Image (cartoon, grey):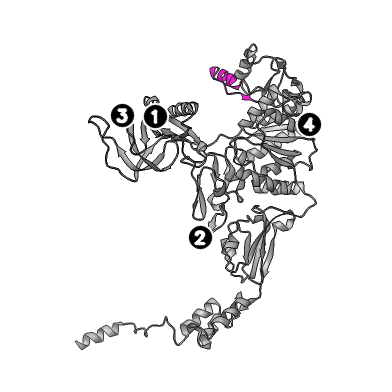
Amino acid sequence: MTKTLLVCDCLGSQHVDFNALGELTGTACSGCHTSLCTTQIETAAKAIKAGDVVIACAQEAHRFTALAEELDAPEPICVDIRDRAGWSDDSASATAKMAALIKDALLAPPSPKSVDVITEGTCLIIGAEETAIAAAQKLSDTLAVTVLLAPGTDFLPTSAYDVVTGSLDKATGTLGRFEVRINNFQQSLTGGRGTPALTAPQNGARSECDIILDLSGGLAMFPAPEKRDGYLRADPGSQTAVADAIFTASQMVGTFEKPLYVRMEPTLCAHSRAEKPACSNCLNVCPTGAILSAGETVTIDPMICAGCGACAAVCPSGAISYDVPPPDHMFRRISALARTYRTSGGTDAALLVHDDHGAEMIGLAARFGRGLPAHVIPMEVSALSGFGHAEMLAALASGFSRVDILLGPKTERDALDPQLALANAIAPDQSALLDITDPDALSDHLFGQTPTPATTDPILPIGSRRQVARLAAKALNPDLGVLALPQGAPYGAVVVDTDACTMCLACVSLCPSGALGDNPDMPQLRFQEDACLQCGLCTNVCPESAITLEPQLNLTDMALQQVVLNEEEPFGCVECGTLFGVKSTVEKIVEKLAGKHAMFANPETARMIQMCDGCRINAQYHSQNNPFAGKERPRPRTTDDYLSKRKDH
């Protein structure tokens, strides 16, 4: 069914070519309205009731959503073409951009997975007596409050909330499941006159709570405290901050949905093998500490994960992938924006990636300033840190001439900076981070850029992030074979010192991606560059330190084939001639052990070193000093033995 498109020029403040938009987006658009959210609301109601409607207005999305609820109709799709395109010094040529934004909005993301978090309102307040007690008095009617004061603090008894003293030693968990450990823990004793008597001090006291309100003014209890659900931290010297924290705490009672931001596939993880360390990229960039080492893989606590997406951006194998939305949806959005803009007559497209903070800046720049240039296509994402090199390259190879990422105040740059460096190593100077906080400065910067045409024929970004990155890199560098990459890149070659390598093949047995392999018919170390994650496990496990990593991106077909890194002449069994082992290795062992070790003191035992497994066992079994030999086996007893024994008696 064809969707209905409702457009509005917002009291005549923008020009909208409704005929062109309907044709370019494949929707039914019969006209342009002037005040769709007020005087023409009946038109919106009629379209919403009919269903399958797209309303080109995001400012009043809440109004249209409420109207849909009243009419018991599906919620309409609301897309902003005014702030991002119509209100601009370039608005006269913004039709292609508007069409691209509408097409992007039509790509509805899959419903995110989530789990329920239940909180009953048990709240621990930490801070100085005056501030903490005042907060407890305000929250005691809503929450079950316990105030933790410093040891030795005098306080008045009350039945409205609990007061304890002690020093917080450790806190773990998240909303609905915090666990705290307190030293010098003392509770007040009921009854008595004057200052309450306290129980004997106790170290290591443990308790649980749903919410922690930290008004101590000291160091945060958790890394990235603003990302820890249920942990509210405010400067006790700021009445506004304390009041906001108290109000937020009062709302944290009931059942909440916690999105499951990332998906983990343990079999792909290259964290460790045989207790040898390898990749720890995700551990290094996780701001909340939600990722922990768990032997050969890592584990992610979904309750602590704040959804920054950094782990997915730096994961070389795809074991961790962002799931709100998944990577293929992101690639489809990028492709739809570029393709629609191009087929609508737009040229020299540039992609501006931003989050909700960036959306506010764009809105302010549009309302009070120059807005965005017509060739700059904004794309809002939920996690900027998850927009890695694969997404940047996919945008450039899909038809964008450059990619700018507008940073927000809470953006984690530990992952973005190396991802940008990697993208620019593959496509030089076509991606950048914009650390701009002023809307007018943002407009000036974007208008000051000289539009440039795309450098390649557009591709269709399909596949995993790793596959898309390689496809895009090949499209962007059609005449190059091998690109040098910065250290830490997830693509590269393995370089083997053949003089030091003993062909033990420990690297082959532990390679998590199968990039290193052997030949069952002869001593060979093989390598497929396309599969190499540059995790470093082979270098850590090699007993001869014969392996080094060389970060690079081989765009030739040789990267998809197995090549021989080292090979040696096999050794033939001196007994049966069967090929086994490496000739040089066997000869070295004979040289070091024959006649020099007690087990190989005579020629017969030394000769066993040069035998295959089967012949070695036979020779060992039939040797004169066979350590496995026992006494002569007794003769089996027969019926005659029993009868003869009976005759004797």
Residue ranking furthest to the left: 649
**Disc 4 to disc 2, C-alpha distance:** 55 Å
Nearest to N terminus: mark 1 or mark 2: 1
Q: Which mark is residue 130?
A: 1
One can see residue 334 in this view: yes
- Residue 159, image x and y in percent? 30, 27
**Residue 497 vertical placement versus 58 (above, below):** below
Q: Residue at x 65, y 45 (%)?
A: 417
Identify the secondary structure beneath mark 3.
loop
Residue 72 is one of the magenta-drawn residues: yes
Amino acid marked by disc 4: Gly
Dot 3 or dot 1: first in sequence order is: 1
Out of 454 and 154, give the one closest to the viewer. Answer: 154
Instruction: Work out whether residue 102 can be spotted.
Output: no
- Residue 421 lies, in percent from the top left, at 68, 47
Residue 604, placed above or below residue 310: below
- For the residues marked 3 and 1, what is the alpha-carbon distance in whole angstroms? 12 Å
Tell me whether the residue at label 1 lies in contact with that at label 4, contact meaning CB atoms closer than 8 angstroms: no
Residue tagged by mark 2? 275
Q: Nearer the viewer, mark 4 or mark 2?
A: 2
